[in-house]
Amino acid sequence: MRNDITRRDALALGLSAAALATTGAAAQTPGSQIKAADVAAPNLPIEKGASLRMLRPVRFVQPDEDVFRANAKRFTDKTGVEVKVDFVGWEDINQQTAVTANSGAGPDLIIGFGDAPHIYLDKLIELTDVADYLGKRYGGWLPLAENYGKRAKTNSWVGLPFGATGGPLVYRKSIIQAAGFDKVPEDHAGYLDLCRKLKAAGKPAGFALGNAVGDGNGFANWLLWSHNASLLDDEGNICINSKETIAALKYLKDLYPTFIPGTPSWNDVSNNRAYSSQEISLTANGVSLYFSLKNDPATKAIADDTEHQLLPKGLAKTSPMAGLTMNAMVFKHSQYPNAAKAFLMFMLEREQYDPWLTANSGYWAQPLAAYADSAVWQSDPKVALFKDTMVSPYFNGYKGPISTATGAVNADYVLVQMCAAVATDASTPEQAAAEAERRAKRYFRR
């Protein structure tokens, strides 16, 4: 079928996700027991002559890109809609999203990070019909997906989460044990003690304090949330300049000297390189680090000695770890909104999604409950911990609500730079918290 299908042909197709998924699609991954309810899909007749261009974050695991491209081609084979997918560096995706939104031209779809759709609400089409269908078909959306997908305090979906990468602790078991610990302590004092001993042993910890989309924001959020600090309270009032934040930053003053030098300039690949070269023995990262070590004969011994553990709770009730979420959005300037929505549905159906989830070893953990039954979560005990990444109650802008302003604060690295200023003695904890409050208020006034 070519792009010049008639409107009658398109209407006959209906282009429901269910129809696309079951007509010649790839078989479900062996060992997976994913159930799909028999639910009527929204009728999305593809526009005549439709073609699509998409941007999404670059892969950290090669099969992520390979299977994603193969699934996109399968959509083209079924519908005649050409789909061009460009993979963009993590530090560039926010900027390119801003250019696209503000210019009203460019890609039809962008898979950005987390709260990106909430920054550009007036530039996007609603995805509620797609989200409702997928939620009913696959056991419901997980909490983190709902937080990022829905417009605050509504049931209107502005984003369609594809998955999230968790950033738990990654550590060398033998080195931790040599320091006198069976596992990483959950309390702040014990965690600091471990990091000091690792530093003394010449195998320090390392956590990003640079403008790193995943690792920098992840560390800053953990530091705050584990001290019961947050950007906002439940009502949406800015509360970053608090005694809890000051306590967190004072703790960082003690913790930072245990890190390997240079972390204020780290990006999202820096800790991967430092861990792989055995310069550090403790960091936080998605499954990609373990995946690369495991699949390289030169580093398999490091992988065998590697363990994952949820981030220390500190004062929190549960591990304060939010998943860095890939969140799809469709722009109003697209000439082919039905084709775009049909494509997103197709990619999230089990015949496409489960092979992709499995190929990337769960690096982008599922947003829909049914995919917890994917075979990938039984494939390796060291990967199983990532299964519940999107069950987390934590999110950027916590305690919420998510909005244009919370998205802008995150994109501008307000919290990361607050932490870095204290770690490098550029500011006192009190000064840094006050500056973060001042910067945040600029966005909330708009």
Image (spheres, rainbow, N blue to C red):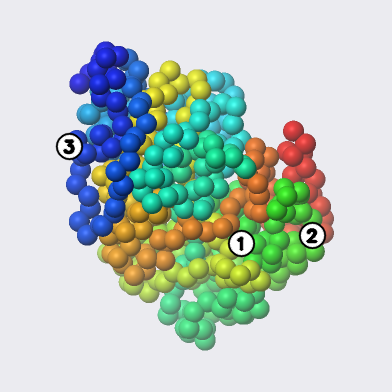
**Residue at label 2?**
242
**365 w.r.t. 256: above or below:** above
Q: Distance between the Cα atoms at labels 3 and 1?
A: 45 Å
Q: Is residue 232 left or right of residue 38?
A: right
Question: Which of marks 3 and 2 precedes in the sequence?
Answer: 3
Q: Is residue 44 above or below residue 356?
A: above
Going from N to C along the chain, the mark reached first, 3 or 1, is: 3
- Image coordinates of residue 426 in percent, x first then y, are 77, 56
Give me the disc on residue 208: none
Q: Earlier in the sequence, mark 2 or mark 1?
A: 1
List the residue tagged with mark 1.
Answer: 222
Secondary structure type for disc 3: loop
User: For this rendering, which residue is in front, 60 or 39?
Assistant: 39
How far across and how far down the image is residue 382, in percent? 37, 68
The percent coordinates of residue 396 (x first, y second) are 61, 50
Q: Is residue 256 visible?
A: no
- Disc 1 is placed on an element classified as helix
Q: Amino acid at mark 2?
A: Ser
Q: Pointer 3 and pointer 1: residues touching (CB < 8 Å)? A: no
* 201 and 435: which is toward the camera: 435
Query: Please, what is the three-letter code of the amino acid marked with disc 1?
Result: Trp
Query: What is the residue that sits farthest to the bottom in this orientation?
Result: 180
Total marks shown come to 3
Q: Classify residue 106 as left or right of residue 22.
A: right
